[in-house]
Image: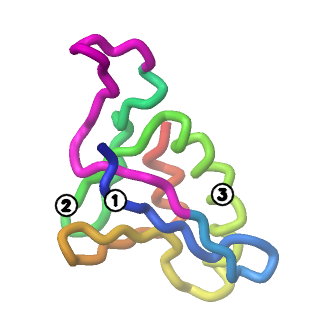
Amino acid sequence: MANLNVRVGNVGPSGQGVRQFEAAEKPLETTIMGINFDTSNDYSVPLKFDKGQTVFITPTQAQAMKLVAVSARTNEMLNGNDSVSVTVNGKSYSMSAEEMVRQLP
């Protein structure tokens, strides 16, 4: 079960928008009686943050995050703040939208 939220900020024309995506600390499969019928819900795409923290998102979310990153990268260049963040066990990790796009398939 996804227990984390990856936050992508600096979104939209004003740079004030935020999008949140579910994530998991480890790769997960959605199974029914041990059989995985729908791989689109698998948290299998790794996203590596600073200090070695990795979280996992679904392939569908990876595609959506790429689209959101276009706006975030532009606003990030203007204000200089990292756009992508996650909090795991009380510790926050971040990366730039550019770095996120490089990692996503």
Amino acid bearing label 3: Val
Task: Tell me: residue 51, above or below residue 81.
Answer: above
User: What is the spatial separation of the Cα atoms under label 1 and label 3, in whole angstroms?
Assistant: 18 Å
* Residue 74 percent across, percent down from the top left: 70, 71
Decide if residue 62 is on the left or right side of residue 78.
Answer: left
Q: Quadrant of the N terminus?
A: top left
Give the mark, 1 or 3, whose residue is nearer the N terminus: 1
Task: Tell me: residue 12, above or below residue 22.
Answer: below
Q: Is residue 84 magenta?
A: no
In the image, which is nearer the foreground, mark 1 or mark 3? 1
* Residue 50 percent across, percent down from the top left: 28, 67
User: What is the spatial separation of the Cα atoms under label 1 and label 2, in whole angstroms?
Assistant: 16 Å
* Residue 28 percent across, percent down from the top left: 27, 34
Amino acid bearing label 1: Leu
Q: What's the residue at 36%, 68% (across, down)?
A: 86
In the image, which is nearer the foreground, mark 1 or mark 2? 1
Amino acid bearing label 2: Gly
Q: Which residues are magenta?
A: 20-38
In the image, which is nearer the foreground, mark 3 or mark 2? 3
Q: Which residue is mark 2?
A: 52
Q: Quadrant of residue 44?
A: top left
Which structural element holds mark 3? helix
Decide if residue 36 is on the left or right side of residue 13.
Answer: left
Q: Which residue is mark 3?
A: 68
